[in-house]
Amino acid sequence: MATSRNRPSAATRRRFERAAGDLGAAAVQQMETQHAWYRALPAEERSWVGLVAQAGIRSFIEWFTGSQDRAHVTADVFGTAPRELTRSISLGQTLDLVRTVVDVVERESSGLAARGDEVKVREAVLRYSREIAFSAAEVYAHAAEARGAWDARLEALVVDAVIRGEADDSMQSRASALGWGTTTDVCVIVGSTPELGPAQVVDRLHREAKRLGVEVLIAIHGRRVVCITGQVADPLETASALGECFGEGPLVVGPVVPHLYAAGRSARAALSGHAAAPAWPMSPRPVLSDDLLAERALLGDLPARAMLVARVYAPLAASGGGNLLETAAAYLDGGLGLEGTARELFVHTNTVRYRLGKIADSIGYDLTDPHDAQTVRLALAYGRVAPEPSTRVTRVPRQAL
C-alpha cells in the first residue's frame, strides 16, 4: 500500500490523467511498429488487442492517481477483451503487449513527472508492471485449466465412442478437435487402474506418451484404464514403455488398425483379453490380445473363437491329405509324445517331428510349448463343432499379426 511519502504529487497525477489518450495511442502505434504477429492478426482481434493496451494505460493511471492499494488488476485490463482472445494470441505475445505498455509509460513518464517525482513515478511503473504481468499469467492459467477440463471430457467421450463402435460424425468431430483427425497406426492398451487419482493417471500417461512421441486418448473405467495410442511403430514396445503408468496385473495390447475410426476392433480385443488374462497366470506383461485367443474364447468371445478356427483348424484341415490336422490331434489329445504319436499314426518318429515343424510354420503355434498346445487343442475342439463354412475362412498366419 502506498503512503503519502511515496505517492507522486497532485500535479504529476493530473498530467498523467490528461495524457491517458496519448499514451494509449502511443502504445498501439508501438505494437504496430514492433510486432509482426500483431500486424498479422485479423482486424477484429487487432482491435481487441488495442483495447487491452489502452485499458492497461487507463488502469495504470487510475491506480497511479488513486490509493495504489489494489493487488489485482485482471478485471481492469484483461476483462476488456473476450476470453477467446487467449486462443488467438499466445502468452508470449501477451507479454509483448504488457512490455510495450510498460515501455511507453516508462518512456513518457519522465516528461510527465513534476520536479522531484521522477523516482516515485519510476517505482510506480515497476510495481504496476509486476502486477499486470501476474494478471496476464492468471488469465492464461484459468484459460488453460478450462481447456484442460474440456479436453478431458472430450477425450473420455471419444474413448467411450470407440469402445461402443460408434464411429459417427460426432465422434469424428470430437476426435478432430483433439488433434486426432489424421492420426494413423492406432492400437488400444488396457491395464489396471493404479492407486492414484484419475487426473493424476491421465496426466502421467500423457507426459510419458509425449516423451515417447506417440498420441494417446485415455479414459478410466473403474478398475481399468483404456488407452488409445496413435502413431505406434511397435505396439508391445510402446505398451512396455507406458507400463509403469498402469497398475499391477495384466497389460493387454489390441491389434494395430489404420486409424481411430477402426479402433473399435482393437478396443474390444484388448478389453476381452484383459478380462481373460487371469486364465493364463504366466502371461507376459504386456501381452498381445491375439496371444489370448484361447482364454478369450473361454469367456464367450465369439470373434476370438472364430479367429481360432480360421487361424488354426482351417489351415491344418486344408493341409495335404489332412496329415497335419491328424498329427496335431494325435499329439495333443493322446498325450503320447513323439514316439507314442508315431505308433498311433503308424509313421516314423522323424515324420512326426517333421510334421510338428510344418504345423509351427503353418499356424505359428509350437505344440511343444504348453500354452501354444492348449490354444491349438481348444481351436481343434471349436473347429470340430463349427459349421462347415467356418472352416473355409481365409488363412491369417499368426506371424503376420
Image (cartoon, rainbow, N blue to C red):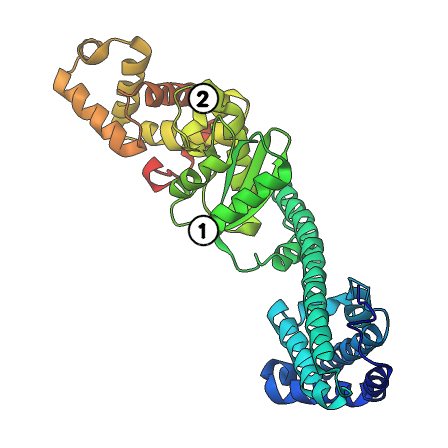
Residue identified by numbered label 1: 211
Apparent side of residue 283 relative to residue 45 in the rendered image (left or right): left
Q: Secondary structure at mark 1?
A: helix
Q: Amino acid at mark 2?
A: Tyr
For marks 1 and 2, the one nearer the N-term is 1
Q: Is residue 320 visible?
A: no
Residue nearest the viewer, comparing 207 with 313: 207
Discs 1, 2 touching: Cβ within 8 Å: no
Q: Using the rendered view, name the quadrant where residue 268 is placed.
A: top right
Q: Position of residue 47 (x, y in %)?
A: 76, 82
Measured along the vertical axis of the image, is residue 260 above or below residue 107? Answer: above
Q: Position of residue 220 (x, y in %)?
A: 62, 37
Apparent side of residue 245 relative to residue 324 in the rendered image (left or right): right
Query: Residue at (61%, 56%) from the top-left corner?
Result: 178
Q: Measure how far apart labels 1 and 2 are at the Cα level.
A: 44 Å
Residue nearest the viewer, comparing 384 with 257: 257
Neighbour tally class for label 1: few under 14, some 14-19, many 20 plus, Cα within 10 Å: few
Residue identified by numbered label 2: 382
Q: Amino acid at mark 1?
A: Arg
Apparent side of residue 130 relative to residue 359 in the rendered image (left or right): right
Q: Is residue 292 visible?
A: yes
